[in-house]
Image (tube, rainbow, N blue to C red):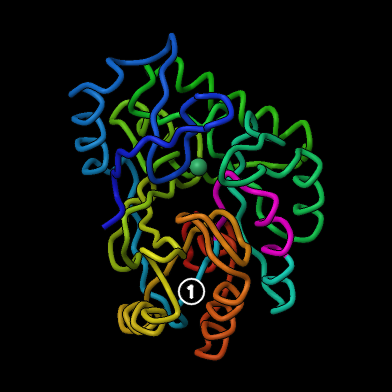
Amino acid sequence: MIEDSRKVATNPASGQERPHDSGGASTGSGDVDAGGLLPRLSHMTGRRVPFRTATVGLDQPILSVTFDDYPQSAFDPGARILEDHGVRGTFYAASGLFGLTDSRWTVAGADTVADLHARGHEIALHGHAHRAANRMRTAAFAADLAANRAALRRIVPTLTRENYAFPYGLCGLMQKRHLAGTVRSCRSVQPGVNAGRIDLHFIKAVEISVRGLTEANLERWLDTAEAARGWLVLFTHDVCDAPSPYGTTPQVLARVVARALERRFAVLPVAAALDRAGIA
Ligand SMILES: [Zn+2]
């Protein structure tokens, strides 16, 4: 489905490649053979090697709604839609993108981080420069992750044991090993329900978008999660009436949350979901 799409988005204003979570690439001094075979092999290997596993078998299925990058529209109306239903979400923030605008959306400003946290949402890591893990040397990756954590902790000093989402869903064996020692979990973009034995550093997630979870297949995904006594993690980007291919509308987002609650799912941020599942 959507995993590992390698499309490159170009920002017409700058001519720069603009990363988002289902395509894109970037180059820099910390890169490993950008565009080459090694990053692909590293991702393919990394995703198959768990450093820490857990068992998920829930009396009550869980839904987590997460936002990557996150655009201003994920902050408002996205966060508000969740709050209107009495639930909270997880916001994976790439601190180097704060306030930047491209052809798809404007990333929310740093000021929204403290606000979301105060309102009960989870602030999580997504890399400072929003670069694919498998395209960075391990030391550069670790430095970027540390910069991301430091930037967010300057805003919310009480953050601890953060969760992380791979930009573009791309991991890398050594990068994943580093993450396993420093973050609580990593979220991928591999569609599926988390049930039974799961890899805590490659959590499956379904995109709320026209090519992922829609109103048409929402009930099937909820059926699958319920039958598996599992944890369904969703992710999206912008939330507006005319969303990008990576986002959704306020109506669909509200429908997803409402149906999950009607079907007696617990709707929880990622950290709270791990707590509920008894995963330290
Ligand atoms: Zn992203």
- The outermost residue toward the top is 29
Residue 100 position in % (x across, y down): 67, 34
User: Left or right: 182 with respect to 84?
Assistant: left
Q: Nearer the viewer, residue 277 or 141?
A: 141
Relative to 191, residue 44 above or below: above
Residue 164, compared with residue 28, is above or below; it is: below
| The N terminus sits in image quarter | bottom left
Using residue 252 as the reference point, say whether residue 57 is left or right of it.
left
Q: Mark 1 points at which residue?
A: 62
Q: Judging from the image, what secondary structure is the residue with disc 1 in? A: strand
- Which residue does the image show at 66% across and 42% down from the upper left? 107
- Where is residue 207 shown, x and y percent of the image? 42, 60
Residue lying at the far front of the rendered structure? 12
Name the foreground residue: 109 vs 198: 109
Mark 1: amino acid? Ile
Query: Is the CB of the residue bearing disc 1 within 8 angstroms of ligand 1?
Result: no
In the image, is residue 111 part of the stretch drawn in magenta?
A: no
Counting from the top left corner in percent of width and height, residue 122 is at 66, 54
Label 1: few (<14), some (14–19) or many (≥20) C-alpha neighbours in 10 Å = many
Image point 45% across, 56% down: which residue? 245
Residues in magenta, as a range:
66-79
Q: Which residue is drawn at 59% across and 84% down?
A: 258
Q: Which residue is drawn at 27% across and 15% down?
A: 33
Locate residue 234, reporting x and y percent: 47, 63
Position above or below: 248 against 30: below
